[in-house]
Image (cartoon, rainbow, N blue to C red):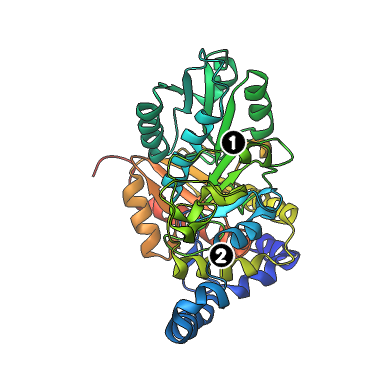
């Protein structure tokens, strides 16, 4: 297995990108699906923002440093990574805030002449925040939330469906949902769809424009490597922008923000997704981090992601004691994101032992070990080493109760 890993790394067209990140040889980092690694050039770029732009230019940096236009400019940098044209994405706020904007905004886009559409379908296995936000949006709009198993979603669409909120990749299992088919089916039923791209943006091609997606949100601190708490993004399809009515209108999304008008008049385009003053330090750290994507083919990223996860699962099969772990991640490539989730007895103790030995994955209680594979800096030798150490740990940590 180690020999095969070395051969695969030698043939990897993305291998040189690893040198762009701050990594250490003692640690195999497989948690980029929670927090991406630091690109090496970002500290110097942020230092310039702090010392020169903030320190010397001060307020002038809103114009001379491009601070004011950063949310749209960085949105246009992210756009090709999710298959969107310019002017569709604005960066700012958290994923949770953007889900709220997108979900309520989607309800407000519905035809008022069709009051029978009174249900918001939500992925029953969703990341908790999406469910919390959907419940709040339901209280605000008067439309009830209906949790639906993603396997049953297509059969649940109907004349009462107003909006569907769905994760592109399931955060626990790594299952990839069929964005083109689900979007088309929702539109056929007369509904709109809001996609959560937190576990797919930067890991695989998305095709927002090509597949007619209505609205989407995503974070930037996972596969986009924007840093802890980096601002999220909001996508609004061009056809919906003239009528997009954000539930959080702020002075930054006003057509003339410095008029300080008491009456709100929304700006045109993606700017409508802005709310208040952007977090410039995090925003510009993200902008710098996106440089690592220059010249990178998303198809190559996807090909390597699938090869990495295939190889890791093969290594786990070879090294782990039989019956100790079961993969929750689909074997079919069309149904897999860029992570592997393994169900494991005593998973907390196993992950603790793995981290102590330099294999950093993460845990989803009660029994899921989660390993994220970031193709820009994860290699096949990383996958082989992680599986080998996992096998050793499983032989030392008994499956029964403590």
Q: Which residue is mark 1?
A: 243
How crowded pointer 2 is (Cα within 10 Å; few <14, some 14-19, many 20+) is rated as: many
**Relative to the observer, which residue lies in front, 170 or 4?**
170
Distance between the alpha carbons at the discs numbered 2 and 1: 23 Å
Location of residue 45 with respect to 130 vertically, above or below: below
In this rendering, is residue 360 above or below 67? above
Residue 236 lies in quadrant: top right
**SS at badge 1:** helix
Position of residue 394 relative to residue 281, above or below, is: above
Q: Are marks 2 and 1 in contact (CB under 8 Å)?
A: no
| Residue at image mark 2 | 70
Q: In which quadrant is the C terminus drawn?
A: top left
221 versus 327 height, above or below: below
Relative horizontal placement of residue 288, taking residue 119 as reference (left or right): right
What is the residue that sits farthest to the left in this orientation? 402
Q: Nearer the viewer, mark 2 or mark 1?
A: 1
Q: Is residue 152 visible?
A: yes
Q: Nearer the viewer, residue 364 or 402?
A: 364
> Residue at image x 40%, y 55%?
393
Q: Residue at x 40, y 65 (%)?
A: 357
Label 2, secondary structure: give it: helix
* Image spot of residue 131 (x, y percent): 40, 33
């Amino acid at each position: 297995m180690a020999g095969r890993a070395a051969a695969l790394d030698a043939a990897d067209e993305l291998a040189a990108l690893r040198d762009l990140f701050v990594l250490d040889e003692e640690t195999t980092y497989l948690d980029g699906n929670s927090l991406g690694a630091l690109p090496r050039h970002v500290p110097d770029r942020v230092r310039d923002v702090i010392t020169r732009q903030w320190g010397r230019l001060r307020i002038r940096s809103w114009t001379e440093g491009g601070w004011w236009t950063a949310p749209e400019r960085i949105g246009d940098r992210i756009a090709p990574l999710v298959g969107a044209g310019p002017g569709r994405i604005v960066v700012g706020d958290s994923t949770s805030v953007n889900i709220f904007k997108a979900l309520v905004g989607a309800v407000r886009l519905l035809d008022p002449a069709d009051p029978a559409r009174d249900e918001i379908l939500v992925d029953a296995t969703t990341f908790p925040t999406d469910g919390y936000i959907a419940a709040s949006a339901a209280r605000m709009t008067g439309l009830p939330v209906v949790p639906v198993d993603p396997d049953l979603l297509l059969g649940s669409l109907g004349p009462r469906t107003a909006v569907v909120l769905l994760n592109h990749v399931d955060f626990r299992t790594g299952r990839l949902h069929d964005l083109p088919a689900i979007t088309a089916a929702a539109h056929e039923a007369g509904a709109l769809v809001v996609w959560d791209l937190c576990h797919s943006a930067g890991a695989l091609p998305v095709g927002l424009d090509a597949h007619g997606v209505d609205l989407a949100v995503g974070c930037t601190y996972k596969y986009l490597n924007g840093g802890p708490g980096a601002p999220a993004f909001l996508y609004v399809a061009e056809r919906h922008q003239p009528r997009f009515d954000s539930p959080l209108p702020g002075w930054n999304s006003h057509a003339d923000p410095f008029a300080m008008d008491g009456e709100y008049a929304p700006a045109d385009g993606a700017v409508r997704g802005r709310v208040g003053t952007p977090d410039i330090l995090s925003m510009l750290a993200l902008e710098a981090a996106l440089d690592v994507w220059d010249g990178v083919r998303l198809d190559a990223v996807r090909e390597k992601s699938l090869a990495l996860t295939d190889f890791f699962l093969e290594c786990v099969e070879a090294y782990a004691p039989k019956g100790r772990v079961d993969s929750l991640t689909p074997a079919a490539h069309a149904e897999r994101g860029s992570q592997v989730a393994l169900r494991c007895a005593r998973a907390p103790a196993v992950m603790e032992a793995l981290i102590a030995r330099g294999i950093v994955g993460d845990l989803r209680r009660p029994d899921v070990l989660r390993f994220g594979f970031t193709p820009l800096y994860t290699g096949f030798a990383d996958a082989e080493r992680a599986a080998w150490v996992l096998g050793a740990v499983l032989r030392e940590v008994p499956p029964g109760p403590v």
